[in-house]
């Protein structure tokens, strides 16, 4: 089996439709793909339908936005039941919050002299309930405000910059309850990307595990190879399983393509031992 347990479609901030993503995964040699759109599960049916024709397994997933000690975290749920009511309504609340946030971001950008960004971002968002910073970024780059995605995040869309507004995402414990309550497995996404200190890392991993989290992403498009080893060590130390995922968003938008996933470091217990 070739697992890719983290990917995005146009139902959140990916560039390919669920069916196109599925086809690409097959061409890239993936045999089990988790579609994990941000705070949304509306692409799962299309992906599943397309995958059935190709003999690819689609693992129903989601990537939930969480605020923990002032830091935004992403929790991936695998093998979730998208119809589980607490999960569905929790995600719906997060999407409603995104709408409010998008308005504030646009106001804040307008105050910095950039007009029309809400309408602009909306044009890039195929799911009207799911406007993300990625859509603002695509608009701002197209407007010539910044040269590329990296610069636009650095100069406008990160804490302290004109287009960034702090946001109250879900609570970690709620996200874990929704995932677990739906029969799913909770994975701490790209842990190396959070700006937290060593003490907070330990606290997060303990809290995550004790509240029902099962695995950490060890190999992800957001980790440099030396971080694979670091996070394999943390996983082992805290009794967590190891996951792998490209976090693919689209051709030219991601560090790794679908299925471009190095093997887990030795000694890792893979999350698919639970599948
Ligand atoms: P949001 O959930 O609306 O805050 O948007 C977060 C998304 O923005 C992430 O899932 C990434 O796809 C994208 N993103 C965040 N930081 C960067 C960055 N530095 N460069 C490119 N994309 C980024
Ligand atoms: Mn994204
Ligand atoms: Mn993420
Ligand atoms: Mn992601």
Image (spheres, helix red, strand yellow):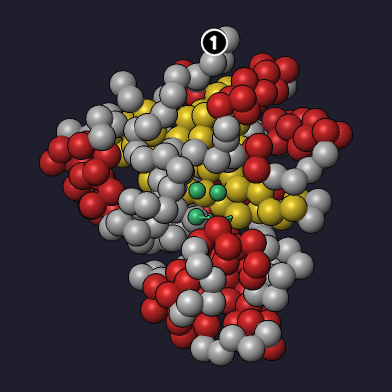
Q: Position of residue 59 (x, y in %)?
A: 36, 38
Quadrant where the N terminus is found in the figure: top left
Ligand 1 position by quadrant: bottom right
Q: Residue at x 65, y 74 (%)?
A: 163
Q: Position of residue 55 (x, y in %)?
A: 17, 33
Q: Nearer the viewer, residue 170 or 198?
A: 198
Compared with residue 119, is residue 240 higher up or lower down, i.e. above or below? above
Q: Going by the image, does 205 lie left or right of 147?
A: right
Compared with residue 255, is residue 141 higher up or lower down, i.e. above or below? below
Number of marks present in the image shown: 1
Q: Position of residue 225 (x, y in %)?
A: 56, 27
The answer to which image quadrant residue 138 occupies is bottom left
Q: Residues within 10 Å of mark 1 (few under 14, many from 20)?
A: few
Compared with residue 69, is residue 233 higher up or lower down, i.e. above or below? above
Q: Residue at x 59, y 86 (%)?
A: 114
Q: Which residue is mark 1?
A: 266
Q: Going by the image, does 264 lie left or right of 25?
A: right
The answer to which image quadrant residue 41 occupies is bottom left
């Amino acid at each position: 089996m070739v697992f890719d347990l983290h990917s995005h479609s146009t139902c959140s901030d990916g560039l390919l439709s669920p069916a196109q993503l599925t086809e690409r995964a097959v061409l890239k040699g993936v045999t089990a793909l988790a579609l994990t759109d941000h705070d949304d599960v509306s692409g799962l049916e299309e992906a599943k339908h397309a995958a059935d024709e190709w003999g690819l397994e689609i693992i129903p997933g989601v990537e939930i936005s969480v605020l923990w000690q002032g830091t935004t975290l992403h929790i991936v749920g695998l093998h979730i039941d998208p119809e589980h009511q607490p999960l569905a309504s929790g995600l719906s609340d997060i999407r409603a919050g995104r709408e409010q946030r998008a308005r504030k971001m646009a106001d804040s950008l307008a105050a910095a002299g950039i007009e029309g960004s809400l309408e602009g971002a909306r044009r890039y968002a195929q799911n009207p309930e799911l406007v993300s910073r990625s859509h603002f970024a695509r608009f701002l780059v197209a407007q010539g405000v910044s040269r590329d995605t990296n610069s636009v995040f650095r100069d406008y869309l990160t804490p302290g910059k004109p287009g960034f507004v702090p946001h109250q995402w879900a609570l970690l414990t709620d996200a874990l309850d929704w995932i677990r309550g739906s029969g799913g497995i909770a994975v701490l996404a790209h842990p190396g990307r959070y700006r937290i200190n060593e003490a907070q890392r330990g606290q997060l991993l303990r809290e995550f595990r004790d509240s029902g989290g099962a695995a950490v992403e060890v190999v992800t498009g957001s980790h440099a190879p030396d971080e694979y080893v670091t996070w394999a060590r943390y996983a082992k130390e805290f009794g967590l399983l190891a996951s792998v995922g490209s976090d693919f968003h689209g051709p030219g938008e991601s560090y790794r393509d679908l299925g471009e996933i190095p093997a887990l470091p030795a000694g890792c217990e893979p999350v698919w031992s639970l599948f």
